[in-house]
Image (tube, helix red, strand yellow):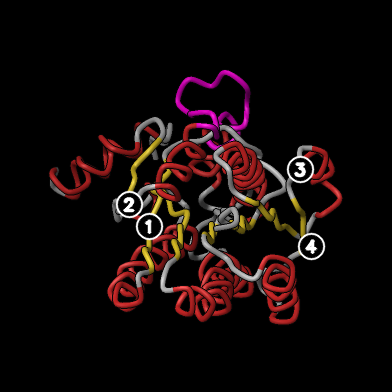
Amino acid sequence: MDKKVALVTGGSSGIGEVAARQLKDAGFTVYAAARRADRMAALEQAGIRTLSLDVTDDASARAAVERIITDEGRIDVLVNNAGYGSYGSLEEAPLAEAQAQLDVNVLGLARLTQLVVPHMRTQKSGTIINISSMGGRFATPLGAWYNASKYAVEGLSDALRLELAQFGIDVVVIQAGGTRSEWGAIAAGKLRATSGHGPYRVQAEAMSKTLSASSEPGYRLASPPEVVGRAIVKAATARKPRTRYSVGIGATPLIWLSRTLPDRTFDSLIKRFAGVRA
């Protein structure tokens, strides 16, 4: 059989870029897709195919999947990694921004999945890997819409796993802990813009510092994206992958504590962990 084919969304940086490289090293034919296709020149030089893709646009998503099927005849692994963090108080966040967060993190994921599943059903095999977060199991201050999107990814993935098992298709969730990437700086910028000047400003400033720090090299409370990439490769190559992989600093213990501690006790722990005192 020809090499297995993997599609990685959000492939221009961070976890997506690393996962594309690691999947290629594992023997896959890899397509990395992102809105910022110009930022993937290094991936092309490494032998990874690149695609321009906006997961919120039907025509863009359809064209990307059709390109892969035309070129390769199959898709074996879909890594739904495209996403971003929209932070700010629920009171102040415009609902248009909430819609944008859900459009990318949830509906964009669902859009690519809908397009890929018919091909996997025909093959009677495939693996769909949805990148969630420890924030899909518990909330952090001022992250209501981001947390809502990741909680939705968790529930969507559970339902999808039950639906697709009959066709030989696995559905896996990667629950990433703190990861060093530009994600944190982008989320901090959105937080300051939304809540940095109003009644939540003290809390917003503390939380934005924590988010920004995760983008800095050597930050001890964030893992390198390679840690998450290795979990993606493990799920993609396993004969029977686990339904969830909790990886990165903080993910496993914090998820466990969120299920074990009383809510208010865990709230206090998370506020301290996030650097928030208010």
Looking at the image, is 1 positioned above or below residue 276?
A: below
Looking at the image, is 76 positioned above or below residue 242?
A: below
The picture places residue 148, in percent across and down from the top left corner, at 42, 64
Q: Secondary structure at mark 3?
A: loop
Q: Earlier in the sequence, mark 3 or mark 2?
A: 3
Magenta stretch, overall SS? loop
Q: Residues within 10 Å of mark 1 (few under 14, many from 20)?
A: many
Query: Disc number at residue 52?
Result: 4
Identity of the residue drawn at 46% across and 59% down? 130
The answer to whether any part of residue 198 appears in the image is: yes
The picture places residue 28, in percent across and down from the top left corner, at 59, 48
Query: Looking at the image, do the residues carrying marks 1 and 2 touch, with CB atoms under 8 Å apart?
Result: yes
Residue position marked by numbered label 2 in the rendering: 241
Quadrant hosting residue 1: bottom right
Q: Earlier in the sequence, mark 2 or mark 4?
A: 4
Query: Disc number at residue 47?
Result: 3
Quadrant hosting residue 26: top right
Q: Secondary structure at mark 2?
A: loop
Query: Disc number at residue 172?
Result: 1
Q: Earlier in the sequence, mark 3 or mark 1?
A: 3
